[in-house]
Image (tube, rainbow, N blue to C red):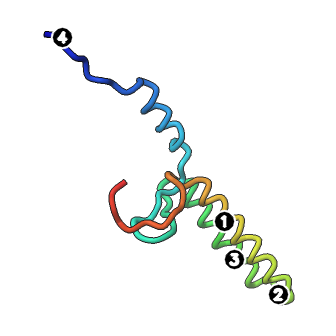
Amino acid sequence: MIRQRHARPHPRADRDKDDRNEGAWFVPKRYGYGATPVRWQGWALVAAYVAAMLGIGISGLPIAALVVLIVAATAAFILVTIHKTQGGWRWRWGGRE
């Protein structure tokens, strides 16, 4: 009788997966879109965004300038968050992944 060996995953397979998520500052929410900070860098980004919004709000700039600054800061915040979220952003229905 021939003895069959079980296929093992390549030893680098798990390490490569960990390397991709090593720099993740956020984890995705279980339902819908969005992410939650899990590292200090994520919390620092959220604090910086809140501080920027407060600073823009009390700056006394004209409405047009306020809108441009808010849109630019929000777009930058969302792009960094998407890039630094483990597994990326997509709609989630609450299942385990």
Q: Secondary structure at mark 4?
A: loop
Name which residue lies at 51% across and 57% down. Answer: 26
Tell me residue 50's x, y (percent).
Answer: 63, 73
Instruction: Residue 65: give its label.
Output: none
Q: If the image is split into quadrants, where does the C terminus sit? A: bottom left
Three-letter residue code for mark 3: Met
Q: Which quadrant would residue 89 be assigned to in this image?
A: bottom right
Q: Outermost residue, top direction? A: 1
Three-letter residue code for mark 4: Ile
Q: Give the distance between the C-alpha atoms of the residues marked 4 and 1, in whole angstroms.
A: 58 Å
Q: How would you rate the neighbour count of disc 2 (Cα within 10 Å): few for under 14, some for 14-19, many for 20 or more?
A: few
Closer to us: mark 4 or mark 1? 4
N-term mark: 2 or 4: 4
N-term mark: 3 or 4: 4
Q: Which residue is mark 2?
A: 60
Tell me residue 91's x, y (percent).
Answer: 48, 67
Q: Which residue is mark 4?
A: 2
N-term mark: 2 or 3: 3
Q: Which quadrant would residue 47 be assigned to in this image?
A: bottom right
Q: Secondary structure at mark 1?
A: helix
Q: Are marks 3 and 4 in contact (CB under 8 Å)?
A: no
In the picture shown, does residue 52 fall above or below 87? below
Picture mark count? 4
Q: Give the distance between the C-alpha atoms of the residues marked 3 and 1, in whole angstroms.
A: 11 Å
Closer to us: mark 2 or mark 4? 4
Q: How would you rate the neighbour count of disc 1 (Cα within 10 Å): few for under 14, some for 14-19, many for 20 or more?
A: some
